[in-house]
Amino acid sequence: MKVVVSLAELWEVRRFLNSPVGLVPTMGYLHEGHLSLVRAARQECACVVVSIFVNPTQFSPTEDLSTYPRDLERDLDLLEKEGVDLVWTPTKEIMYPADFQSWVLVEEVTKPLEGAMRPGHFKGVTTVVAKLLNAVQPQKAFFGQKDAQQSVVIRQMVKDLNYPVEVKICPTVREPDNLAMSSRNAYLQPAERQAATVLSRALFAAREAYQNGERNANRLRKTMQAVFNQEPLARVQYISCADPNTLQELDLIEDHALLSVAVFIGKTRLIDNILLP
Ligand code: PAF
């Protein structure tokens, strides 16, 4: 497994990788969710590239950039065991030199949900993903369904800007008690860690109602709210039942729906979602 930092080194190694090349973009502090993306890439691609970069432009000034968990040595160990060919760990200076001034903006699907709660977040995500795709030039790129809106936004960007890459979205990986895996779970104190199961419990309660025939979106939102009301450590930011492509809120589920939630458990902000049916 080669590990490179500069763009020149990346391009030097990239020239000799067999196609199709699969890229798994990450911010490090890898867990089973990331490794499931690496395994999917390993299955589908001749060569696998993983990028590790905690992208400062997708954090607002009040968010957790400085405390975001990092452990490069452990990450490299895990990736080596997965048979990854190349790891790119660019620095902030490489990705955003002092005279940096070009941004990628996706307009509509970035407005609701995470976009409404985290202004500027998706401008940072689309810009860094565009840069990663341009630098690595993969045939396939792998992202997790856990960040549902990010997946929609990246698909839109790839389509709008004619990136010659296939975007692959892999299922959310959950802990045995169904908490969706996230690097931010590391922030949770023991009592909060227990309380954090409320996200999947709320989503699964709504799914059960849906499976029992409920199609009224507001009643599904209320079903989720009722589960959150039982958890004193949870502070809900949004509860959504939206069209999975446009992310517009639904009145009635006629076809598919994306149920998604954003919730503070103590100081830690967690998100989760499921697709219906
Ligand atoms: O999902 C993430 O970890 C990040 O948003 C990504 C796609 C690596 C861009 O920084």
Image (cartoon, rainbow, N blue to C red):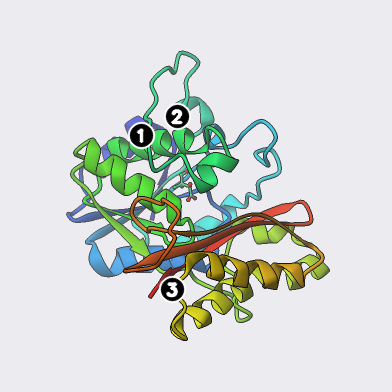
The amino acid marked with disc number 3 is Arg
Measured as percent of width and height from the top left, residue 76 is found at 50, 56
Give residue 95's mark.
Answer: 2
Q: Name the residue under label 3.
A: 215
Which one is earlier in the sequence, the residue at label 1 or at label 3?
A: 1
Q: Nearer the viewer, mark 3 or mark 2?
A: 3
For this view, does 156 lie left or right of residue 176? left
Q: Residues within 10 Å of mark 3 (few under 14, many from 20)?
A: some
Q: Is residue 8 left or right of residue 210?
A: left
Residue 151, label in figure: none
Q: Are marks 1 and 2 in contact (CB under 8 Å)?
A: yes
Q: Is mark 2 on a helix, strand or loop?
A: helix
Q: Where is residue 269 in the image (x, y as percent from the top left)?
A: 67, 53
Q: Which amino acid type is marked by label 2?
A: Met
Q: Residue 131 carries which label?
A: 1
Disc 1 to disc 2, C-alpha distance: 8 Å
The quadrant of the image that shows the C terminus is bottom left
Q: Is mark 1 within 8 Å of ligand 1?
A: no
